[in-house]
Structure formats: C-alpha cells, structure tokens
Image (spheres, rainbow, N blue to C red):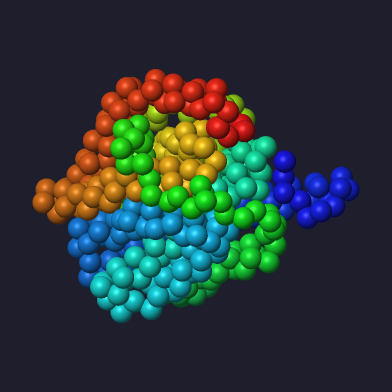
Amino acid sequence: MFIEAGSSEPNTRINNRFLIMALLWLAGAGLRLTILAPPPIISFIHDDLGLSETQVGLLSGIPAALFALAAVPGSLLIARFGALSALIIGLLVTAAGSALRGAAPGATWLYAATAVTGLGVAVMQPAMPSLVRLWAPKKIAFATAVYINGLLMGEVIPVALTLSVVLPLVGSWHWDFVVWGGACAAVALVILVLSPSSGVTVSAAARKWWPDWRNGLIWQLGIMMGCVNATYFSTNFFIPRYLHAIGHAGATGLALTALNLGQIPASILLLLCGRGLERRAWPYMGGGLLCLCGISLIVSDSDLMVVAGAACVGFASAIVLILMLALPPQLAAADDVHRTTSAMLTIGYSCAVIVPVFSGLAWDVAGLPAMAFAPVLLCALLLIAISATTCRRLRTVADSLAVAGISSHQ
C-alpha cells in the first residue's frame, strides 16, 4: 500500500502514487548527477591541472572509495534519523562538494572536493531501499526499478548535456561542476517539500546499523558488485583519455553517451521481464561476457566500434547493477535492509576503488593507451567466475526468507 496523505478519493490516491514515484526517480537521479560530471571534461581538467594518467585514475577512484568508507556510517545515520533525513543530508553534501570542485585551483583541492561529493552520495545509497519499502511496501519491485531508472538517467544527463549544452553556456569546467551541484540542491529542496509523511517511528530493531560481516554470501555479492562498478567507472574515465591519445577525441561525447545511454534499455527490459532473474547465474555471466566483448571493441581504432563497445559495456553493467540492487529486500528482514545494503556497497566499492588506479598505472608503465582497459577485462572474468558458484546459494537464502514470511513484497 502506498503511503497517502489521508484522502480516500481515487484521484488523490493516484496523484500520491505518481508523486511518490516521481520523488523516487528524482532521488535516484541525485545519486549520480555529480558523479558522472567529470568524464566529459576530464581532458580539460587534465590539461589545466597537469594531471598524469595515474592521477586521472585516482580521481575516478575517489568517489568509489567514499562509497565504500561511508556506506556503514550512512546506515548509522538511517538508524538514528531515518532514511528520508539521510537522503536530504546526502543530497546537500553532494551539492556542496560539487560546487567546491568547481573552485579547485589544483589537484589536491579537486581530490578533497571530490571526496566530499562522494561522501554525500555514499550516505544516500543505503537509504534508497529503505525509502522504497517505506513509501511503497506493496510495490517494491516496481518502485526499485523506478529509482534505478532515475539513477541511470542521472548518469546519462551530465554526459549527454555537458559538452553540447552546459559547457558552451558557462564557458569553463569550473562552472560546469557548479551547475550539477545546483541540480542536486534543487532535488533536495523538491523532496524536502513534497515527500509524504509516513508517521513511522524508528523501532529498536531498526536502530541496528552494523552489518553482519560474517555472512559469506554478502562478501561474494559485494565482490560481484565491485567487478561491475570497477568496469563502469574505469570505462567512463578512460574512454575520453584513450580517444584523445589515439587522435579520435571527436568521438568522446558520442562514446560516453552510448556508454551511459546503453543502460536505459537494460532498465526497461528488467522492468518488463526481470522478475526472479536476480537469483539466477546466467544474467551475471552474460553481463560479464558482454563486458569482455565491449572492451574488445573499445580498444579498436574505429569510432563506430568504440561507440558500439561502450554501449555494450553500459548495457551489461546496468543489467548486473539493477539485479544486485534488487537483492537486499529479498535477503534481509525489513529492519535489516539498510544494513545488508551498506555491507554490499562497502565491499563492492572497496573493490572498485583500486581498479581505475591500476588502469592508469598500466597505461603509464606500458606506455600504451589500450592497457588502461586490461584491469577491466580481469574484472569481467572474475564476475563470470564468482556468479557461476554464488547464485544457487542466493536462491536458497531468498526462498527460506520467503517461507519464513520476512522477505519483502515483490
């Protein structure tokens, strides 16, 4: 049942349902609007601040590091103040961090401001599954798909609009960061004003926040998430540098748009026919194989192949990410969703932190631009290997929770 404002009129119920879904979509977009702002302008930043390729990889890895380090504190914030408060705080911190990036006079300032931006997003991420359960407890699968679609569009919008619209209007990469930070602040304001009041108090059980690190399944899932996160972030950051290095910089905007826009069909496909796929091995293994094919196309000299390969990586990454984000409500009781989510995010983004740095290091050491994608290929292989042995246990756990009557409504 959707949370409503007290009216029993059908039109009011429909309006409230639409409002809740719109707010979830906006919140999802706010998770990524600032994170994917750097790739389109990374070459400008590289030249202005004199960054090495390893430093570019480090810049890519900072948000993922904060996603890992702050996921559990985000769970604590949710336990103490509620998911909605955590979401609003995270959006405002993200907006401030993005604006500070725009004022960066050097690499150190840029790194610190990027850490603030990542901190805000890290606080928000474990709040979203809890908000889905709170606002739409009978429509969890659909509401999850809605906010993930917003997340994916939040990745596409900065990539699609930065070079073609925002940068020509504001004139520099500094102001580009300010624009996307302002967008996050606007999302926070809209959600603060329009969000429904649940009237739900935080129970003693819900105050639990420390994840169960002894759960081996959570570690396996976290590493799988790390493989796909590392693939996505590394590819976003190194496609522009790779194309610039091989003299095909003109294809950068199209390739990044394909990488991020390629995720949208994945979200629609899973919305229509994705029920139960998150507990099967073949979608994860197929995603890994598609990533391997996509990277092979990206390192070709053809602009068309680079764009096609980027779209393949985006589609495959989205398939795996969406399926994994649908798992916490099925693997934990209602009061433990934020703890399970924070554990998966911590492990997953810890794995993702190091790969972009190794991508840049591989390029610097070998002197070959294509070597930046070698660690990404290894991630795809690891995803295939782990998923082949994990999903049988996953189905057993989810089925046992369903029998016990403590899993979510699907």
Residue for point 68% across, 56% down: 199
- Image position of 304 (left or right of 18): left
Viewer-side residue, 9 vs 113: 9
Location of residue 19 in the rendering, given as x and y in whole percent from the top left corner? 72, 53
Q: Is residue 399 above or below residue 56?
A: above
Identify the residue at the far right of this view.
Answer: 9
Q: Nearer the viewer, residue 195 or 60?
A: 195
Q: Is residue 190 left or right of residue 369?
A: right
Q: Is residue 79 above or below residue 189?
A: above
Residue at 11% over, 48% down: 366
Residue lying farthest to the front in this orientation? 204
Q: From what the image shows, is residue 72 above or below residue 268?
A: below
Q: Nearer the viewer, residue 100 or 43?
A: 100
Is residue 123 shown left or right of residue 264?
Answer: left
How many numbered discs sit on the rendered protein?
A: 0
Q: Residue at x 48, y 43 (%)?
A: 336
Give the left or right position of residue 279, taking residue 201 as reference.
left
Say which quadrant the N terminus sits in.
Answer: top right
Residue 203: x and y in percent read 56, 51
For the C terminus, the image quarter is top right
Percent from the top left, x then y, of residue 2? 72, 45
Q: Quadrant of residue 348?
A: top left
The answer to whether any part of residue 81 appears in the image is: yes
Q: Position of residue 374 (x, y in %)?
A: 22, 40
Quarter of the image where one finds residue 38: bottom left
Residue 315 shows in the view: no
**For the point 34% across and 35% down, which residue is it?**
215
